[in-house]
Image (spheres, rainbow, N blue to C red):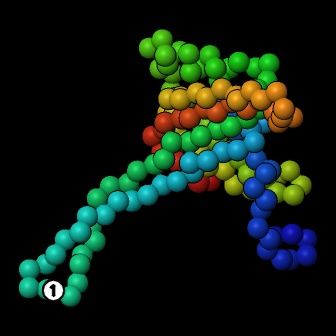
Amino acid sequence: MTSTGKNYPYISFRFHVEIQGLIVGGFSEVSGLQVETKTQDFREGGVNDYLHKLPKGTEQSNLTLKRGITDSDILWKWYQDVVDGKVKRKSGRIILMDFEGNEKWHWTFEDAYPVKWVGPDFKANSNAAAVETLELVHKGIKKG
């Protein structure tokens, strides 16, 4: 709530990404905060007008982090370790802040490691930042 007593939605561009307790850069986009419970259909004998939906299992999407390339190569080295067969699982948080810059919500991901790195597209006629993308697989998301 703000000082006026009204509830306002939080704006989506005020966030940080933290891995192993360190803020790892200014990301322009985080996607994949998704959890879905799959269901299995079951028809009960003699009941033709109803289809039971039973829970089958819950799946989490991979997290995708996008940011402008910087002098820091921490994320690249983390992915290169995976390529070299040295998988280092790390936990982290995506932190949403309010208008004053205070933490309001966070989503914790556990035991993540990179499974895909995408480098920037270079275009001579563009002023856009060079963006790298890192995709992480993880064991689950919790909201705090």
Residue at 66% across, 45% down: 30
Query: Residue 105's quadrant in the figure?
Result: bottom right
Q: Amino acid at mark 1?
A: Asn
Q: Is residue 26 visible?
A: yes
Q: Nearer the viewer, residue 49 or 109?
A: 49
Within-10-Å neighbours for mark 1: few <14, some 14–19, many 20+: few
**Residue 132 left/right relative to 126:** left
Q: Position of residue 109 (x, y in %)?
A: 55, 42
Q: Position of residue 17 (x, y in %)?
A: 70, 39
Look at the picture and state if 39 lies above or below 77: below
Q: Quadrant of the N terminus?
A: bottom right
Residue at 59% across, 20% down: 78
Which secondary structure, mark 1?
loop
**Residue 117 left/right relative to 13:** left
Q: Nearer the viewer, residue 101 or 43?
A: 43
Q: Position of residue 93 (x, y in %)?
A: 64, 41
Q: Identify residue for label 1.
A: 48
Q: Is residue 91 visible?
A: no
